[in-house]
Amino acid sequence: MKSDTFWRYATLAPAVILFVLLTILPLFNLLALSFHDVEWLNREAVWEWVGGRNYAKLPEDTLFNAGILNTIIFAVLAVAFQMVLGFWLALMTTRVTRLRVFYRAVFILPILVPGIIIGAIWKLMYSYDFGVINQAVVLFGGNPVDWLGNPRLALMSVIIVDVWHWTPFCFLLMLASLESLPQDIFEAAEIDGASKGQVLRYIILPLMMPAIIVTFIFRMILAFKVFDEIYLLTGGGPGTSTEVISFTIYRRFFTEDQSGYGSAMSLATIAVIATMIILASRFATKKGPDA
Amino acid sequence: MATVELKGVSKRFGAVEVIHSVDLSIREGEFLVLVGPSGCGKSTLLRMISGLETISSGDLFIGGKRVNDVPARDRGISMVFQSYALYPHMTSAQNMSFALKLAGKSPDEQAERIKPAAGVLGLGDYLDRFPRELSGGQRQRVAMGRAIVREPEVFLFDEPLSNLDAKLRVRMRAELKELHQKLKTTTVYVTHDQIEAMTLADRIVVLRDGVIEQVGAPLELYDNPANRFVGSFLGSPAMNFFELSIPDGTPDRARFADGDSLQLPRELGGRSSVTVGVRPESLELVSEAGDGTISAEVAVIEPTGSETELFLRKGKDQIIASFRDRIDVRPGEIVHLEANPAKYHLFDTTTELAI
């Protein structure tokens, strides 16, 4: 029994060590960094202890505030649309038997394209002068719209791109969940007298809730980290209208070389994301039938 | 309670017809069992009655009303599925009251309606449990409870006991029968298990390849099978069949290839061959070969406690005989069997119909 326990830990150790080295240590390093200012003297990093000053500065940083606010708006709206669209597409395609593989392949395509290329494609499509979207607008008698240059529209335009990019991800997870539901209960519901709407409300949605929550958490985490699309489409502008938090961190940390302050900002962001995940999983365990 | 009537009902999947013009009349309050081997169309027929499957041609009447185009929920039926099909995210009580909730009944009324059903099925202590917290037998009861609560005109059961272990199946079978005696609701019950069919049914319908082979009371079918298939399907162990020749000049005798011959219960003039069916329990062991005995070699002996089953070989034929008494024989031994000619079932060798 004793050697059994020993081997259990011994075989687990390499994975634990790797995990600590790659995940926990950098996080601690980040935490330590966030309480310091780093200066470069004679090609050496000099850490100066500043206590909680980096954190205290955060609420007054207009770029950080705009970044957090925009990121929350971006994440909530984009993920909401992706979830609803993905769920709807899954509902529609699960009943399709003809050309099933074709439909699915088409829906999944956007997820295969790298974000940076998606940014490039959509930048061309959104172009004020020759973008295909404005061409369509003009064709239908409208005036060209500055999709990415208008502060009121820019964030929405970026959200549309993200919805296009990530809806297939939600679709895939929802479809997998939907197709794993037992089919006989739908027949039982039919005999019990449930309409299609009632089947959706009382059977499909409650049973899919764990999958919905997991998809939601995944997508929220990824949406909070959005960078490449926005970097290429708007660069955070015009003004701060599409400034997202990963962009702000990038600026502060690397462009302005404020690694201590950037670290504090990163940890604050992690705290926000973690809070959202904890809340969502609490909700999941409360509502999910088999969670 | 309602009658169910099928008139020329057929089912086609594409070009393949799986149910061929079935005519069947189910009486009010009757317990009718559809039985047949896998793929015979019994479940399809049940699903057509339920409304889960469309009817390709013919007419279906429930309570005298044509319901071909009536959706499942409006046919006044309840169905118990082989897999129980309980809603996994609902408690037993919620499962049972779901139909009532959909029908807009108040929570009080729902609780009121499930109470007697839960009482009948002994589910009182399990109402707040989810299906995953219940045993197979309890799930089965919840599924039945869900069917009862709707107070249907007709109960439909699709192999409801086949997922239970043997012991529980016997108990649930008895409970089902008792339930039917209490509620007296018209019931259509599908099974491939001929013992379930024999024990539960008022009448049995034997199906093969989408065609009704015979309809009748269990013992009527057992004692007078209309053809070789029905004879072979009902009864366990299954009926023995011997394809025998009728020598010229002795129309009341049938002969095995090895020379043994049987006295037939009546003369079969004009025939040169006959298939004789003998139930395993009709055979008796005799100590010596004689007129009308069958000699065979013992292959396997299976004592079940209450009975002893002998598997014997006679030329190419295999014979099964079962005895209430314990018998002392050994594999390889030649034994002699005899049956009362009145217990023989005679079938035409070609058409397989009873003669």
Image: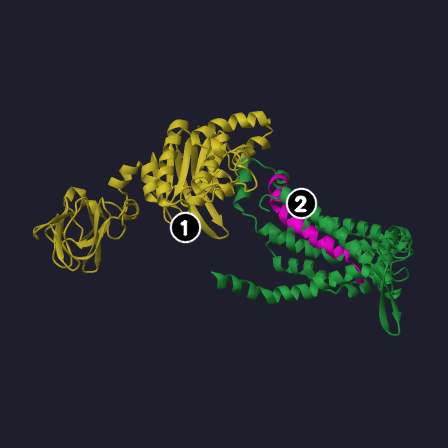
The stretch of residues the image draws in magenta is A200-229
Does residue A164 appear left or right of residue B60 in this picture? right
Residue in view at x 44 percent, y 49 percent:
B18
Residue B104 is situated, as x and y percent measured from the top left of the image, at 60, 29
Residues B91 and B331: in front is B91
Q: Measure how far apart labels 1 and 2 are at the Cα level.
A: 48 Å
**Callout 2: 10 Å neighbours few (<14), some, many (20+)?**
few
- The reply, left or right, for residue A132 in relation to residue B260 is right
Left or right: residue B208 versus residue B283 is right
Q: Which mark is residue A120?
A: none
Q: Position of residue A62 (x, y in %)?
A: 90, 53
Residue A282, numbered circle: 2
Q: Amino acid at mark 1?
A: Gly
Q: Position of residue B317 (x, y in %)?
A: 21, 57
Q: Are marks 1 and 2 in contact (CB under 8 Å)?
A: no
**Which is in the foreground here, disc 1 or disc 2?**
2
The one of B139 and A285 positioned closer to us in this rendering: A285
Task: Say which chain tag 2 marks.
Answer: A
* Chain colored yellow: B
Amino acid at dot 2: Arg
For the colour green, the matching chain is A
The chain letter for the residue carrying disc 1 is B
* Secondary structure of residue under mark 2: helix
| Residue A146 lies in the magenta stretch | no
Instruction: Count the marks.
Output: 2
